[in-house]
Amino acid sequence: MIKWNLLTGFITGIAANIAGVLLYVALGSKAGIDATLADAVHNGYLGKIIALGSVLNFVPFFIFLRKKQNYHARGVLLATITIAIGIAIYKFV
């Protein structure tokens, strides 16, 4: 049961990050989502956009904590750490 709660939190964290990236691009860019992300890859600031998108992970994290669903919150935290490691690898490779 704990593994499923952790997995649910992890998937929620990844989904919140994707939603945060899409929301940031939709609100902060005049071009389309695909053009903005292609430009970010070309100019090397995709990691910054993904990091800004992970700010939206605060919402499910604190909701899970308030509802006393600690393993779900750990999953969201694990997703955030995984994304941070992925950004670091992308940046240095």
Image (cartoon, rainbow, N blue to C red):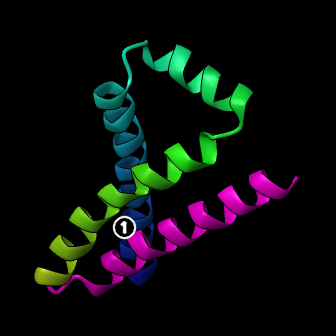
User: Where residue 58 appears, x then y in whole percent?
Assistant: 28, 67
The quadrant where residue 81 appears: bottom right
Relative to residue 23, is residue 52 depicted above or below?
A: below
Magenta includes 92? yes
- Whether 59 is drawn above or below 36: the answer is below
- Quadrant the N terminus occupies: bottom left
Nearer to the camera, 7 or 46: 46
Q: Nearer the viewer, residue 38 or 5?
A: 38
Image quadrant assignment for residue 62 = bottom left
Res 1 seen here? no
- Inspect the image, locate mark 1, and give the three-letter code of the amino acid beneath it: Gly
The stretch in magenta equals 68-93
Q: Is residue 30 magenta?
A: no
Q: Is residue 49 above or below residue 58?
A: above
- Say above or below: 80 vs 26: below
Image coordinates for residue 52, horizontal then vertical, percent: 43, 52
Residue receiving disc 1: 9
What is the chief secondary structure element of the magenta stretch?
Answer: helix
**Secondary structure under the numbered disc 1 in the rendered image:** helix
Furthest residue to the left? 67
**At x 42% / y 42%, what residue is drawn?**
18
Report the front residue among 47 and 70.
Answer: 47
Task: Report the label total.
Answer: 1
Residue at 71% across, 38% down: 44
